[in-house]
C-alpha cells in the first residue's frame, strides 16, 4: 500500500497545528505523487462517516509516530541503522512494501527539517516536538498515546542499547503527550524477566502491599487492554496484545514470589 492510502485522503487531527506544519514539509511531493498514482480514501464511496473518522485517526496516529520517532532516533546525535530498520519493518508489516521507502523518506525529511530549524535556534525542533505532543494529547485517547509510546520505546531498544539521552527524550515525549515518567520506565522494562523489573512494569515499589499490587495490575490491565486501540487497526491491536501479555507475565512473577493467586 502506497503513501496515498496510509497518509493521504482523510488526515484526521494532524491537518492543523504543529503536526500539520511538519506534515506539509515532511510529505512534500510524496503526497502529490502518491495521490496521482492511487485513489485516496477521500474518494471512496464505501466509507461512511465513522470509517472516515477512524481512517483519519489511524493515519494521524501513524504520522505522529514518525514525527516522534524522528526525535527519539536522533536523541543520541546519530541515525542508527537498526532503528531505521525497525521503522521500515513496521511500515512493511502494516502498509506493504511500497510504503517503506516513502515512510523512510518522510523520516529523512524530518531529520533535515530538524537540522534547518536548529541552525537558528538549538531548541527549535525540541519545542516543536513538545507542541506536537500537546496536539496528540488533545486528539488521541490515553490508551492510544500509551501504545504510541510503546512503539517509540521499541525503536529506542532496537539497537540493543537505550542510552541516557534516548531515555531523556522518551520521557520528554511522554510528558508532552500527557503521560508520566513512570510509564516510560514501565515500557523500558517490559522485555525483562527479572522480579525487580516486574515491579517497574506495574509502576510500583517492591515494598508495595499485596492489595497495592493487585490494584496496580487492575489499573494497568484497564489502560493497556488491546480493545482500547482496536479502532486504529488490527495490526496495532495485535501489538497492544503482545504488550498486554508482557504485563501479565510481570504480574505473574510478582504473584508467584508473594504466593498470591
Image (spheres, rainbow, N blue to C red):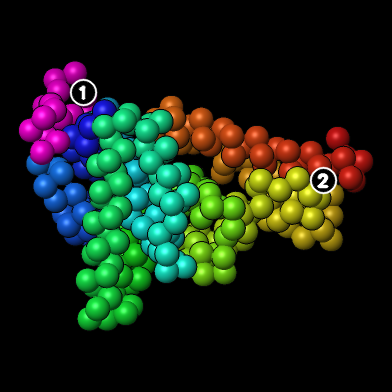
Residue range (magenta): 33-50
In this picture, residue 144 sits left or right of residue 221: left
Could one spot residue 237 in this view of the protein?
yes
Vertical placement of 203 versus 123: above or below? Answer: above
Residue bearing the label numbered 2? 254
Residue count near mark 2 (Cα–Cα under 10 Å), binned few <14, some 14–19, many ≥20: many
Residue plotted at (11% across, 47% down): 29
Residue 244 x, y percent position in the rendering = 61, 37
The Cα atoms of the two marked residues, 2 and 1, are separated by 46 Å
Task: Indicate whether residue 18 is drawn in magenta.
Answer: no
Task: Tell me the quarter of the picture where residue 91 sits.
Answer: top left
| Element on which disc 2 rests | helix
Looking at the picture, tell me which residue is in the foreground, 71 or 144: 71
Residue plotted at (14% across, 36% down): 34
Residue 139 x, y percent position in the rendering = 34, 50
Task: Indicate whether residue 47 is drawn in magenta.
Answer: yes
Residue bearing the label numbered 1? 47
Amino acid at each position: 500500500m502506497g503513501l496515498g492510502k496510509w497518509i493521504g485522503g482523510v488526515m484526521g487531527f494532524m491537518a492543523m497545528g504543529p503536526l500539520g506544519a511538519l506534515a506539509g514539509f515532511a510529505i512534500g511531493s510524496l503526497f502529490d505523487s502518491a495521490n496521482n498514482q492511487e485513489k485516496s480514501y477521500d474518494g471512496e464511496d464505501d466509507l461512511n462517516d465513522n470509517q472516515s473518522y477512524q481512517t483519519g485517526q489511524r493515519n494521524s496516529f501513524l504520522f505522529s509516530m514518525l514525527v516522534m520517532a524522528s526525535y527519539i532516533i536522533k536523541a543520541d546525535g546519530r541515525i542508527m541503522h537498526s532503528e531505521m530498520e525497525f521503522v521500515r519493518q513496521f511500515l512493511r508489516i502494516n502498509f506493504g512494501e511500497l510504503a517503506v521507502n516513502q515512510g523512510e523518506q518522510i523520516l529523512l525529511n524530518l531529520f533535515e527539517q530538524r537540522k534547518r530549524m536548529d541552525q537558528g535556534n538549538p531548541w527549535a525542533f525540541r519545542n516543536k516536538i513538545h507542541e506536537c505532543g500537546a496536539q496528540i494529547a488533545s486528539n488521541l485517547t490515553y490508551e492510544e498515546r500509551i501504545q504510541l509510546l510503546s512503539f517509540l520505546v521499541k525503536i529506542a531498544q532496537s539497537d540493543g542499547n537505550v542510552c541516557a539521552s534516548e531515555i531523556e527524550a522518551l520521557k520528554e515525549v511522554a510528558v508532552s503527550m500527557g503521560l508520566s515518567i513512570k510509564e516510560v520506565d514501565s515500557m523500558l522494562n517490559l522485555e525483562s524477566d527479572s522480579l525487580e523489573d516486574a515491579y517497574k512494569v506495574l509502576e510500583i515499589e517492591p515494598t508495595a502491599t499485596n492489595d497495592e499490587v493487585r490494584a496496580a495490575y487492575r489499573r494497568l490491565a484497564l489502560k493497556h487492554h488491546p480493545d482500547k486501540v482496536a479502532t486504529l487497526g488490527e495490526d496495532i491491536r495485535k501489538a497492544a496484545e503482545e504488550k498486554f501479555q508482557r504485563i501479565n507475565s510481570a504480574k505473574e512473577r510478582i504473584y508467584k514470589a508473594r504466593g498470591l493467586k
